């Protein structure tokens, strides 16, 4: 399958050690699965057995070792795509939020949680959730953190799904409710990252940021690329690349590497996986979700 680079990486300094069981490389991916429900016919994107089989078959094509997931109802929903015989499944412990009527089909929504799947054979520790991202408000998602372990070192990986609806470059200038909520989430994320930079703890943040960080004038990009009023070195692999969605060319799914993770980043390994043999052949109706998976490869080095 054809692959196109589509991840964004913000790179800082430090030391990272993490690898898969063959000791060579680790592929990290993120995928918003668009209202993945436990049961057939439920939720805002009702699916049947055939749809779940297609999702499972597609998941095999990008051969990831760790996948951050967004918009999943439960571990049972995830297991329909990532079988438990092959994967450890971790789902955010966020309390259930109020259901709403789905646009277009009139059904009741299922839960939208953040999750992570880790291929069996990879050592890890469940580090819990970053509840502060939820701002104590119904419907907002927590961050989900795991520590990938290799020898005596760890790589902290956090899956996130930030507030949707604020797609302006400077959220501080908008009076939209979504932007006001997003603005409150930003310092939570920034503090989490800066703590790890100060403590020399390598990390990855990946998921649906609902924000166009690849744009040079983007406010969140600027916030994350400075610490204590000093610039932080940034490597942005998204400069001239586009999202897979036919109607939304600017990507909102991202992979950020910090505090040493850049040492193991494999140049040119960022990829997006289209729901067709080639990007040109994919139509919106071909999409199994309204987001395409993205990935990046890390390689252990001396």
Image (cartoon, rainbow, N blue to C red):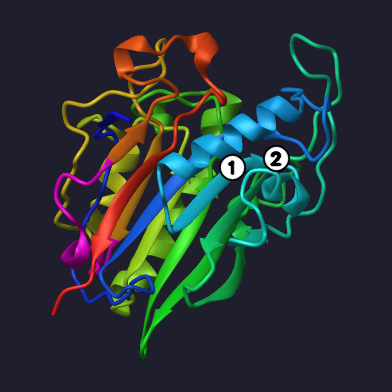
Q: Is residue 297 left or right of residue 97?
A: left
Question: Residue placed farthest to the bottom in the image?
Answer: 152
Asked if the residues shown at circle 2 and circle 1 are in contact, with their CB atoms under 8 angstroms apart, the answer is: yes
Q: Is residue 90 left or right of residue 197?
A: right
Residue 187, position in %: x, y? 45, 53
Which SS does the magenta portion mostly show?
loop
Chain-order first, disc 2 or disc 1: 1
- Circle 2 residues within 10 Å: few <14, some 14–19, many ≥20: many
Q: Is residue 235 magenta?
A: no
Q: Which mark is residue 112?
A: 2
Relative to 120, residue 96 above or below: above
Q: Which mark is residue 239?
A: none
Query: Where on the picture, by quarter, is residue 299?
Result: bottom left
Residue 292, position in %: x, y? 45, 30
- Circle 1 residues within 10 Å: few <14, some 14–19, many ≥20: many
Relative to 69, residue 177 above or below: above
Quarter containing the C terminus: bottom left
Relative to 165, residue 246 above or below: above
**Residue annotated with mark 1:** 70
Quarter containing the N terminus: top left
Segment tinted magenta in the rendering: 258-270
Q: Residue at x 40, y 13 (%)?
A: 282
Q: Residue at x 77, y 50 (%)?
A: 76
Residue 205, position in %: x, y? 41, 55
Viewer-nearest residue: 300 or 21: 21
Mark 2 and mark 1: span between their CA atoms?
A: 7 Å
Query: Where on the picture, by quarter, is residue 35?
Result: top right
Q: Is residue 123 left or right of residue 83?
A: left
Q: Is residue 81 left or right of residue 208?
A: right
Residue 219, position in %: x, y? 31, 36
Q: Could you tell me which secondary element the residue under label 2 belongs to?
A: loop
């Amino acid at each position: 399958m054809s692959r196109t680079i589509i991840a964004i990486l913000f790179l800082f300094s430090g030391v990272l050690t993490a690898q898969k069981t063959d000791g060579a490389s680790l592929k990290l991916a993120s995928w918003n699965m668009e209202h993945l429900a436990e049961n057939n016919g439920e939720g805002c994107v009702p699916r049947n057995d055939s749809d779940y089989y297609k999702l499972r078959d597609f998941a095999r094509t990008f051969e990831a070792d760790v996948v951050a997931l967004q918009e999943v109802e439960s571990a049972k929903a995830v297991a329909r795509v990532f079988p438990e015989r092959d994967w450890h499944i971790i789902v955010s412990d966020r309390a259930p939020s109020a259901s709403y009527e789905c646009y277009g089909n009139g059904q009741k929504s299922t839960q939208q949680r953040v999750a992570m799947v880790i291929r069996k054979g990879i050592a890890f520790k469940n580090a819990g959730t970053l509840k502060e991202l939820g701002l104590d408000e119904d419907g907002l998602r927590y961050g989900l953190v795991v520590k990938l372990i290799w020898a005596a070192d760890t790589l902290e990986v956090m899956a996130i799904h930030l507030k949707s609806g604020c797609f302006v470059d400077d959220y501080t200038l908008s009076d939209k409710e979504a932007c006001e909520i997003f603005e409150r989430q930003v310092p939570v994320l920034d503090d989490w990252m800066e703590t790890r930079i100060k403590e020399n703890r390598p990390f990855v943040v990946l998921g649906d940021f609902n924000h166009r960080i690849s744009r040079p004038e983007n406010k969140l990009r600027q916030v994350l690329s400075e610490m204590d009023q000093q610039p932080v070195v940034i490597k942005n692999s998204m400069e001239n690349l586009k999202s897979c969605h036919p109607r939304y060319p600017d990507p909102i799914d991202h992979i950020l590497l910090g505090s040493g993770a850049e040492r193991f980043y494999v140049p040119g390994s960022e990829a997006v996986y289209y729901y067709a043999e080639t990007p040109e052949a994919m139509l919106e109706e071909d999409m199994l979700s309204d987001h395409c998976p993205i990935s990046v490869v890390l390689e252990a080095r001396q």
